[in-house]
Image (cartoon, helix red, strand yellow):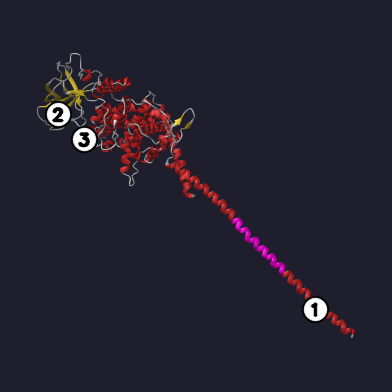
């Protein structure tokens, strides 16, 4: 009882601290205007992000037609895109005699003879001894001078690009180079490049490998696992992974289109957000702070990119919180997006003030919260596929979306099982229940499999919630939220206290009853003993009286004599 009381006390005390924290967070949220996306003020303009959004919108438009030609157009948009970022792949005449720092200003001459400025595209810089270098054209003024791919200027002459052979000027030093302007200028960032560059940027970089990327790379057995899946969906073919394969030959263009769109955002861009955060953390220098609130420019710029990319996930999180009744979570906590926004802003402030020690903690929590809508979406489509009767295109669309959401989270479950002494094989269960193509889905099994891994994923039953019917103001059948360990402990404490009280009352009654009966028995015995004594005394007295009477009689007889 004492231990149970202590747990209850600590919980209530924690509740007070949680309420105080929530008041602070609500104040922070109210101080920032809501714009329909993460409330965040970037230090740098990320111009190419608007082009990425345009690419996504055009792909969606092409898929709405659902014919072969539109599929080809969508694939071209995915591969080439309309991003305004251009990168030149240069070859030096001789190996670099010294390292070129990533933040170095670089200039050269264009084909038309104008001066061009830019920087290194690779975060690691140009290493001593390298003969190849990728030059990123400057687009910070919002204009694009070197147009390539879908944006090649009308006369097909890339006049705004670096001249075919010339010199790069870095810190007043000349580095002779050559390249082909037509074939070696490309989009540094396209929808496809988010995945195809993952091995280089998330596994082979100076601060690599990144833990979250390793989970997916190991599960699928591919550096560009997202692009592999997307390309297979475009082609109506099967993937060739170590595990978690998808055969898109089982889908029509409707299902394949959904797989492409969802894979781009929730597998490719989702990981790119994490990679940008990791890169920003690696670039943060605690000694680079000459001016307060204006430190670590390169790190801040990269962090800004991560936040801008997150806005592609934002809408999904908002939609799911309404469907799972978690827009305002338990104990006054705000929504997932509000929490992530707070963490993004705190990290930006720390970077600009050269405080780097907390950044990894921010990133870890952001990734955990980013996982919530993936789990919710998988559960939602598992429920639809199990309980709701739909046919034709809608059924295929639901199965394709569910399979993609599952593919975006299953590698994390597999990692959890690898570190579990008694693996439950939940990753395989969810994969089989949610795989591509027509099949039976058991929602309850999927739900239980996820719940067994919430602790490992760093999320809770409160974060996920349950599938909610807003009109009925109740949760759908078998889709109620699970109970977190703390809530289960409190329930157990309540049961223990109730049992303790009942046992106490029963013991008291038993004690009274057991104590009363012996006393009554003793009183009865004593009463009987007393009655017996009285009867004996009465008989003895009677005998004495008879004897006295007899003596008296004899005396009288003697007198008579």
Q: Nearer the viewer, residue 90 or 446?
A: 446
Q: Tag 2 or tag 3, which sits nearer the N-term? A: 2
As drawn, is 398 to the left or to the right of 234? Answer: right
Does the stretch in magenta take in 515?
Answer: yes
Q: Earlier in the sequence, mark 3 or mark 1?
A: 3
**For the view shown, which residue lies furthest in the left direction?**
94
Is residue 260 shown above or below 420?
above
Q: Dot 3 lies on which element?
A: loop
Question: At 48% across and 32% down in the image, what residue appears?
Answer: 474
Q: Is residue 296 visible?
A: no
Q: Report the number of numbered marks.
A: 3
Residue 189, located in which quarter of the rendered image? Answer: top left
* Residue position for label 3: 204
- As for residue 528 lying within the magenta part, the answer is yes
Label 2 residue SS: strand
Identify the magenta region: 511-532
- The furthest residue to the top: 155
Q: Which residue is mark 1?
A: 547
**Magenta-colored segment: predominant secondary structure:** helix
Q: Measuring from the top left, give residue 327's x and y in whole percent.
A: 42, 30
| Position in image of residue 51 (x %, y %) | 28, 21
Would you say the residues marked 3 and 1 are in contact, meaning their CB atoms lie under 8 Å apart? no
In the picture provided, is 272 more to the left or to the right than 380? Answer: left
Report the Cα–Cα distance between label 3 and label 2: 16 Å
- Whichever of callouts 2 and 1 sits on the residue coming sooner in the sequence is 2
Q: Position of residue 188 (x, y in %)?
A: 22, 25
Looking at the image, which residue is at 32% across and 38% down?
412
Q: Position of residue 81 (x, y in %)?
A: 25, 22
Give the labeled residue for mark 2.
132
């Amino acid at each position: 009882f004492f231990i149970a009381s202590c747990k209850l006390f600590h919980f209530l005390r924690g509740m007070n601290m949680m309420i105080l924290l929530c008041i602070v967070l609500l104040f922070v949220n109210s101080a920032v205007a809501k714009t329909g996306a993460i409330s965040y003020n970037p230090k740098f303009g990320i111009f190419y992000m608007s082009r990425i959004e345009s690419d996504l919108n055009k792909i969606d438009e092409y898929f709405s037609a659902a014919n072969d030609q539109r599929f080809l157009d969508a694939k071209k948009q995915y591969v080439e895109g309309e991003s305004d970022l251009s990168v030149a792949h240069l070859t030096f005449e001789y190996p670099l005699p010294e390292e070129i720092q990533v933040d170095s200003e670089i200039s050269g001459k264009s084909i038309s003879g104008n001066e061009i400025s830019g920087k290194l595209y690779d975060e690691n810089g140009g290493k001593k001894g390298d003969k190849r270098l990728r030059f990123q054209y400057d687009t910070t003024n919002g204009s694009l001078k070197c147009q390539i791919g879908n944006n090649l200027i009308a006369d097909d002459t890339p006049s705004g690009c670096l001249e075919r052979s010339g010199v790069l000027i870095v810190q007043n030093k000349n580095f002779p180079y050559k390249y082909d302007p037509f074939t070696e200028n490309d989009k540094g960032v396209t929808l496809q490049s988010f995945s195809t560059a993952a091995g280089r940027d998330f596994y082979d970089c100076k601060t690599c490998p990144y833990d979250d990327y390793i989970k997916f790379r190991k599960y699928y057995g591919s550096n560009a696992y997202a692009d592999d899946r997307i390309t297979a969906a475009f082609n109506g073919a099967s993937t060739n992974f170590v595990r978690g394969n998808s055969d898109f030959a089982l889908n029509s263009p409707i299902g394949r289109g959904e797989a492409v769109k969802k894979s781009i955002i929730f597998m490719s861009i989702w990981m790119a957000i994490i990679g940008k955060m990791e890169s920003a953390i690696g670039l943060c220098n605690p000694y680079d702070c000459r001016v307060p609130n204006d430190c670590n420019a390169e790190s801040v710029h990269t962090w800004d990119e991560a936040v801008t990319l997150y806005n592609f996930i934002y809408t999904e999180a908002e939609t799911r919180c309404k469907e799972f009744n978690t827009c305002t979570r338990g104990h006054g906590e705000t929504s997932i997006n509000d929490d992530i926004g707070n963490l993004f802003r705190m990290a930006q402030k720390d970077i600009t003030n050269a405080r780097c020690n907390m950044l990894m903690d921010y990133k870890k929590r952001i990734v955990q919260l980013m996982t919530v809508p993936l789990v919710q979406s998988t559960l939602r489509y598992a429920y639809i596929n199990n309980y709701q009767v739909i046919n034709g295109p809608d059924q295929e669309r639901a199965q394709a979306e569910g399979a993609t959401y599952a593919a975006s989270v299953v590698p994390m479950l597999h990692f959890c099982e690898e570190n579990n002494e008694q693996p439950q094989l939940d990753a395989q269960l969810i994969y089989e229940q949610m795989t591509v193509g027509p099949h039976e889905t058991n929602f309850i099994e999927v739900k239980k499999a996820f719940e067994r891994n919430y602790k490992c994923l760093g999320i809770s039953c409160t974060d996920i919630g349950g599938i909610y019917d807003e009109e009925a103001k109740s949760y759908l059948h078998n889709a109620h939220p699970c109970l977190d360990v703390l809530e289960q402990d409190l329930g157990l404490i309540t049961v223990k206290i109730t049992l303790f009280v009942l046992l106490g009352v029963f013991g008291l009654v038993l004690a009274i009853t057991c104590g009363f009966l012996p006393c009554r028995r003793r009183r009865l015995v004593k009463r009987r003993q007393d009655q017996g004594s009285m009867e004996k005394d009465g008989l003895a007295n009677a005998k004495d009286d008879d004897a006295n009477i007899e003596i008296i009689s004899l005396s009288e007889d003697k007198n008579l004599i």
